[in-house]
Amino acid sequence: MAEKLDYIAVLIPCYNEEKTIRKVITDFQRVLPEAVIYVYNNNSTDKTAQIAAECGAIVRNEFKQGKGNVIRRMFREISAQCYILVDGDDTYPAEYAREMADHVLRDSCGADMVVGDRLSSTYYSENKRPFHNVGNNMVRFLINQIFHADFMDILSGYRAFSYHFIKTFPVLSKGFEIETEMSIHAIDKNMYVENVIIDYRDRPQGSESKLNTFSDGIKVIGTILRLCRTYKPMLFFGIIALVLTLISLAFFIPVLTEYLATGLVLRFPTLIVCGFTFIAAILSFFSGMLLDCIVRKNRQDFEMQLLKVQNHFNRLREEETK
């Protein structure tokens, strides 16, 4: 079966969103009448899939639980010139979709990813969960500091993507850490990212969030550390090497002081542990150097992969225009 290239694809991952999914679909149909709307049902136990089908959306199923698993299948199965990813909980207004899509579809310098920035508008007044506010700010600070970026909203679930981003993005996360992974991938691969300030509204009454503040927050922090190890190995292993070196010196200096004063090594076990700790620091440092070389090579390979994706995209566009 030939690969079909949609002009704009609206992707809505859903799990038990029967109270809001009808409004989300009809809003996007009104704002983007030319778009194809896909709802991926993730083991919902309510009428989410039925309502989505009634509204004219293309409904598909992903049986592996978790937002990351759903997005992996979406990105693999759908081809489009522009993708709009949005949650099915009606917290993101459809009115901004046209502007976000236009940023991607510009012929000369289209963005690879457009992030709907909630934090610069109404998020803090609308969101009723204060720990979410703290978590958003902490994650944004960590990523911007570690990766030398200037993201305004790391965890936004409202984004637009180019074909090139979607088809070169390896989805590894299984849950809500997926937005963090997208952001770091864009930074590392020198993708062109733009922000569009959007209004945010809290979930309507009776609609429950699937996000657990603490457990999912810990997963996001773990994802940041894992991706730091993957994309910034010299920084990650360099810090470990520095910490081990400082520990080694802290215990070695008293042993050295005693030796200079008495001519005797009175604490041989401590000296031995200091030696092994320092060796571990050296190994960590050179591991970081080696992995940094591998990461640089991977970036070179990615540029070649991007060229192949571009050529494939051009062929699809030519076929669609025939």
Image: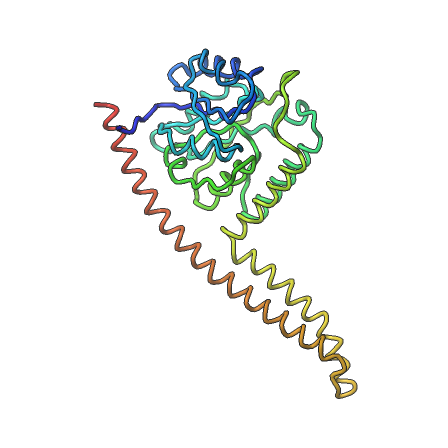
Q: Is residue 301 above or below residue 30?
A: below
Specify the quadrant that holds the C terminus: top left
Q: What residue appears at the point 75 percent right and 88 percent down from the top-left corner?
A: 263
The percent position of residue 318, horizontal first and vertical second, equals 24, 28
- Residue drawn where x is 54% and y is 24% of the image: 15
Report the residue at 43% width, 45% height from top. 189
Q: Nearer the viewer, residue 13 or 283?
A: 13
Instruction: Pinpoint residue 19: horizontal percent, then vertical percent.
Output: 58, 15
Q: Is residue 207 above or below residue 267?
A: above
Query: On the picture, is 231 further left or further right than 247?
Result: left
Pick out the residue farthest to the left. Answer: 322
Total residue callouts: 0
**For the view shown, which residue lies furthest in the bottom direction?**
263
Residue 233 place in picture, x, y as percent = 52, 56
Along the horizontal axis of the image, is 156 left or right of 321?
right
Q: Position of residue 159 (x, y in %)?
A: 49, 29
- Note whether 21 is above or below 296 in the view shown: above
Side of 55 where 176 appears, left or right = right
For the point 57% across and 45% down, the residue is 224
Q: Quadrant of the N terminus?
A: top left
Q: Picture quarter containing residue 92?
A: top right
Residue in the foreground of this view, choosing between 304 and 229: 229
Picture layout, residue 105 above or below residue 138: above
**Colouring scheme applied when the structure was drawn:** rainbow
- In this view of the protein, which residue sits in the foreground, 170 or 141? 170
